Image (cartoon, rainbow, N blue to C red):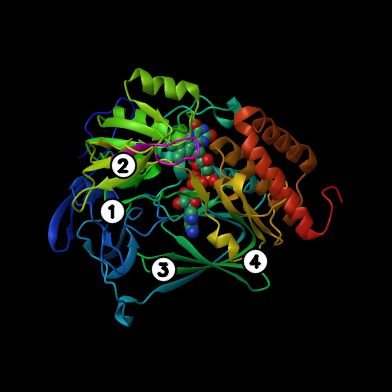
């Protein structure tokens, strides 16, 4: 399952190591996560559903779903998709019932900083770069590396040159990381699990493998926790081998591991189209892409490339069923009429051993919700988001959001929003010379990004978020 040759990526398989999975010795390479190393050895069932014990496989690959939870070195519920494998590690199926002995002793560490940033993706790193010019900044990420979703984007980005258009996502991640680590403190492998208002902002972070609980006191917090992939309702959607599109990108482009031999993609937006091409680059066949809308949602340049490669894109089609014995062995697709109802007799069997869902993202707002900031369901933003003003500050003073967690958009806008949040937070803390000029420049830039056909949805989302923010705060936008 490990990819040996790739036109863009060179997989740096470091030292060969061994770990134990339910007592069996498994080969891995340093730098692989537990779940990806198991995948490479064809272990696709990572957990079981609590009630019916149905098998669960790799889905999101970024620690946001629960399908990869396993017991590691005696610690239950470890998210194996973001935990690096280590020599001699003992990995077991998760116990369904936990007892006191499952909660080992932990060390407690206190950290103080002026600005804490939760999430080291493009939004968080840009916020950190901006704010660290004037303040003491701590960036926390639960993954083992910085970069967020950029670490798996092998394609060249669109947008403006200043926001790194024409550069591959993986290179942008490296540039941002290099810049951020110069001036920010960074805490990796640490999930922020709680927020408390103690008269100051207080976060609780956990590094399960090192058994450390961090107590973090900050003057301002910027939440840049990204988004999670949407699930789709169909028979067999929980079979191992049904992945989120981003999960497959993580497996292939970060760890160099194939998800299977032949895939079916659901969703012909940019993510589905780009993924199809990346699967071909990894030497994996794509049976077809199905899209429920009567037209392709992604950019023409991507769909044209996919068609040239001979991959059929069926619009007004969806998936009805995934079937297989304990893993995906095929799918049934159907044609939809103008009311999105299944057309009788249109069922078609597709032979495939994995299915990728590229059906949108939902902002990750669980943490910011704990702060008491007002949350609202904004359809155009992708779901529940924290209301915020144009400077990215929420209704809770000193709490900011930016990037996909504040509205599903793009890395380019996530970076600008991060800069706005970082600059505003630091200015309200200690004052920044030329603040007005600097912030106006960023606001102008982000508005320019939201022009045109593809910018209309995020523009509408932001207008609603900002309008509701001022309504809740009981003041006009310019007051
Ligand atoms: C297939 C695909 C193609 C794309 N192509 C483009 C493109 O061409 N151009 C473009 O501009 N954009 C593109 N994007 C979108 C872009 O990747 C995202 O918009 C961008 O990464 C969002 O940045 P972010 O910083 O908000 O979130 P993310 O990049 O998701 O980063 C969030 C970070 O927060 C961390 N985190 C989350 N919760 C916690 C917690 N509780 N504790 C600690 N850490 C936490 C995560 O580990 C992660 O590192 C693409 C996306 C996909 C999936």
Q: CA distance from mark 3 to mark 2?
A: 37 Å
- Crowd rating for badge 2 (residues with CA inside 10 Å; few <14, some 14–19, many 20+): many
- Magenta segment: does it hold 222? no
- Crowd rating for badge 4 (residues with CA inside 10 Å; few <14, some 14–19, many 20+): some
Can you give x and y, in whole percent of width and height, for residue 8 in the image? Answer: 34, 27
In contact (CB < 8 Å): disc 3 and disc 2: no
Residue in the foreground of this view, choosing between 333 and 470: 333
Q: Residue at label 2?
A: 355
Can you give x and y, in whole percent of width and height, for residue 6 in the image? Answer: 28, 28
Q: Nearer the viewer, mark 1 or mark 3?
A: 1
Q: Residue at label 4?
A: 372
In contact (CB < 8 Å): disc 1 and disc 3: no
Tell which circle, 1 or 2, labels the residue nearer the N-terminal end.
Answer: 1
Tell which circle, 2 or 4, labels the residue nearer the N-terminal end.
Answer: 2
Tell which circle, 3 or 4, labels the residue nearer the N-terminal end.
Answer: 3
Q: CA distance from mark 1 to mark 2?
A: 12 Å
Tell which circle, 3 or 2, labels the residue nearer the N-terminal end.
Answer: 3
Q: CA distance from mark 1 to mark 4?
A: 34 Å
- Residue at 30% across / 64% down in the picture? 49
Q: Quadrant of residue 355?
A: top left
Q: Nearer the viewer, mark 2 or mark 4?
A: 2
């Amino acid at each position: 399952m490990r990819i040996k040759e790739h036109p863009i990526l060179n997989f740096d398989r470091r030292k060969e190591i061994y770990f134990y999975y339910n007592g069996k010795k498994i080969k891995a390479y340093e730098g692989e996560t537990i779940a990806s190393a198991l995948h490479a050895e064809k272990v696709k069932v990572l957990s079981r559903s609590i009630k019916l014990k149905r098998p669960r496989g790799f889905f999101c690959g970024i620690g946001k779903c629960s399908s990869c939870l396993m017991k590691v070195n005696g610690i239950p519920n470890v998210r194996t998709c973001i935990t690096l494998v280590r020599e001699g590690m003992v990995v077991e199926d998760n116990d369904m019932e936990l007892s006191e002995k499952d909660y080992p002793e932990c060390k407690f560490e206190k950290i103080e900083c002026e600005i804490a940033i939760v999430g080291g993706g493009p939004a968080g790193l840009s916020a950190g770069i901006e704010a660290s010019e004037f303040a003491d900044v701590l960036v926390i990420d639960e993954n083992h590396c910085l970069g967020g979703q950029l670490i798996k984007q092998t394609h060249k980005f669109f947008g403006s040159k200043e926001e790194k258009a024409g550069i591959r996502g993986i290179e942008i991640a490296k540039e941002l990381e290099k810049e951020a680590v110069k001036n920010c403190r960074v805490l990796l492998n640490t999930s922020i699990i709680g927020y408390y208002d103690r008269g100051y902002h207080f976060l609780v972070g956990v590094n399960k493998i090192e058994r450390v609980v961090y107590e973090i006191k900050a003057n301002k917090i910027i939440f840049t926790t990204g988004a999670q992939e949407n699930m789709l309702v169909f028979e067999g959607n929980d079979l191992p081998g049904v992945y989120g599109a981003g999960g497959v990108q993580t497996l292939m482009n970060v760890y160099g591991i194939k998800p299977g031999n032949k895939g079916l993609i659901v969703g012909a937006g940019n993510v589905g189209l780009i993924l199809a091409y990346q699967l071909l680059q990894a030497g994996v066949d794509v049976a077809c892409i199905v899209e429920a809308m009567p037209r392709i949602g992604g950019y023409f340049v991507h769909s044209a490339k996919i068609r040239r490669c001979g991959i059929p894109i069926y619009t007004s089609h969806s998936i009805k069923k995934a079937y297989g014995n304990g893993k995906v062995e095929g799918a049934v697709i159907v044609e939809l009429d103008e009311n999105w109802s299944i057309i009788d007799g249109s069922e078609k069997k597709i032979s495939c051993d994995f299915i990728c869902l590229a059906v949108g993202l939902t902002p990750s707002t669980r943490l910011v919700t704990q702060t008491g900031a007002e949350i609202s369901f904004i359809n155009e933003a992708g779901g529940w988001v924290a209301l915020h003003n144009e400077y990215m500050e929420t209704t809770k003073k000193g709490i900011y959001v930016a990037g996909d967690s504040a509205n599903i958009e793009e890395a380019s806008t996530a970076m600008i929003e991060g800069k706005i949040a970082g600059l505003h937070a630091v200015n309200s803390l200690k004052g920044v010379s030329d603040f007005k000029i600097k912030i106006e420049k960023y606001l102008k830039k982000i508005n320019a990004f939201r022009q045109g056909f593809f910018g209309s949805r995020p523009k509408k989302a932001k207008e609603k978020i900002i309008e509701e923010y001022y309504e809740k705060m009981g003041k006009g936008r310019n007051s």
